Image (cartoon, helix red, strand yellow):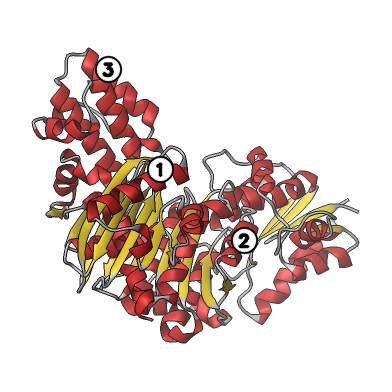
Amino acid sequence: MVKVMVYPPTSMILADLVERMGHEALVVSKEVRKKVNTIGLDSPPLNMTPEDPKKGLKYAAVDVPSGVRGRMALFGPMIEEANAAIVIKGNSCTLGCTGCARTNELTRFLLRTKRIPILELDYPTDDAEAKRFVHKIRQFLEGLK
Amino acid sequence: MIRIAQLSCGSEYSGVQTELQKAVDSVGAELIYPEVSLEDVQDVEKRFGIEVASGDLNLAMARATRIVENPDIADAVFVATCFRCAEGAIVRSEIRKYIHENSSIPVLSYSFTERTTAETLLTRMEALVTTAKYKGLLSRERQTGLTAGIDSGSTTTKSVVMRDNEIIGTGWGPTTEVLKSAEDAYNAALKEAGVKKEEIEGLGTTGYGRHLVGKHFGAKLILEEITVNSKGAVFLADAQKGSATVIDIGGMDNKAISVQDGIPGTFTMGGICAGASGRFLELSARRLGVNITELGQLAMKGDQTKVPMNSYCIVFGTQSLVNSLSAGSKPEDVAMAACHSVAEQVFEQQLQEIEVKEPVIMVGGTSLIEGLPKAMEQLLGIKVIVPHHAQYIGCVGASLLVSGLLED
């Protein structure tokens, strides 16, 4: 079983594909669940506090906007933990819902420079592409040990 | 309850959403998030004019279009993005302009860091709520009866007594102990007006110490300084009809307010760095060995182009000041450079956030330092008005507005 980070880190479809192939998907919903279930924290909606952007300083400098650093406080540890990654490229801002383009760029960059097996695919636009898309992901996941 | 639509990107990830909520709760308002469809977000470029790479910013723009198309869903709008995000700054500014031009809903624009607290936002939120809630009171143009106002500022405390639309007494003093300073200024105004405290029909308070002072004197109106100052400014400048821009460079913070028919539309309140405040001018006067009241006249004889000085940090600004004096610069050139430095910070940091429409009215104690309005005129390329009693706008505004409550 390999820990596979999916990008966008909010994608439930990718997470499902990874889990079906017997691997562990690293997705942001799990990180948010940890936050929301932390006893003693009361900072809705995500239970993130001003301490989180400070934790994000490990991945981005202080002059990077706080929203990027706060998001990196969630995504950074997932990148560190990942042994493989699937990155979906697509121009639409509605692909995934991380919300911030700068965070997306930094996340993709850190995954690419980590030197782990990485599959980069374009977002499918029709049925035939979607089938090839799933097939490539399956092949990639089967090849992971 | 006043409904403030939040159009933002990054606030929940910066850990400041709770602080926004606290600020809104404390002014008795509620935050709302206008519903939009996925198609609205995908088609945002057609409806709003631009599309950016960040999803949350496109969502904010889609929400802005929904508000303009359905103005009944919100009473006020709060637009916020991360400090230092270029994409966020462009979208924030365009949303503010879009709502300002296409609706009469008041807008507050803000860039936050993880250090933003509810306290920082409180005065701004209070002003947003006041503007939405008291449009009738704010549209009042004449002061009636015998009323007074106290402006408990960070540096100075001012007071006026007004009767039938005329200022009949003024009082002024540095703010030390808040209540004592207010008492002294109020007593001086009463003495000059020749009236007793008991005769005053209504008192209004504003400024940093407004709650403490208002409670102590049993004020009928306690209001934040953004709406009150803009009201006082347009009243004194006789610009209550049509558009106007009010600039108030204070001891601790600066306000830039875009006013329409005497009511604030969009505004910014800054004050991150002291190099852009009245404090820097006070310090400059002290270093030049002149009284603050003489700095303006000295500056008017000077030429700022001979002294390099432009810093929003009071330490770096002072360093430039000391270096230029050591290099043999003339005190008048240094004085004008100090005025230009402050004006440039306000111009660069705040006036880009509002619609600058004529007449531009400069108010507050710093507007009496002649070099400062002159520097602002040079930067804006338009005439700047400094009305009579410019340092008393806060208490004049409070005195004018409280008279409206007496009639009601």
Tell which circle, 1 or 3, labels the residue nearer the N-terminal end: 1
Task: Find residue B397 and report its horizontal and vertical position in percent.
Answer: 31, 62
Q: Residue at x 53, y 62 (%)?
A: B54
Q: Chain of mark 1?
A: B
Residue B87 image offset from top left, x and y in percent: 45, 57
Secondary structure type for disc 1: helix
The reply to whether residue B97 is visible in this rendering is no
N-terminal of the pair, mark 2 or mark 3, is 2
Q: Is residue B160 visible?
A: yes
* In-image side of B290 versus B312 (left or right): left
x 83%, y 63%: residue: A18
- Taking the spot 62% from the left edge, 61% from the top edge, the residue there is B22
Q: What residue sits 26% from the left and 30% below the top?
A: B309
Disc 2 residue type (three-letter): Lys
Q: Position of residue B76 (x, y in %)?
A: 46, 73
Q: Which residue is mark 3?
A: B323
Counting residues from the N terminus, which is met first, the one under dot 1 or under dot 2?
A: 2
Q: Residues within 10 Å of mark 1 (few under 14, many from 20)?
A: many
Helix, strand or loop at label 3? It is helix
Question: Given this view, does label 1 or label 3 mark the residue nearer the observer?
Answer: 1
Q: Which residue is mark 2?
A: B22
Q: CA distance from mark 2 to mark 3?
A: 45 Å
| Front-lying residue, B304 or B125 | B125
On the rendered structure, is A102 left or right of A23?
left
Give amino acid for label 1. Ser
Amino acid type at mark 3 = Asn
In the rendered image, which residue does mark 1 sit on?
B181
Indicate the secondary structure of the residue bearing disc 2. helix
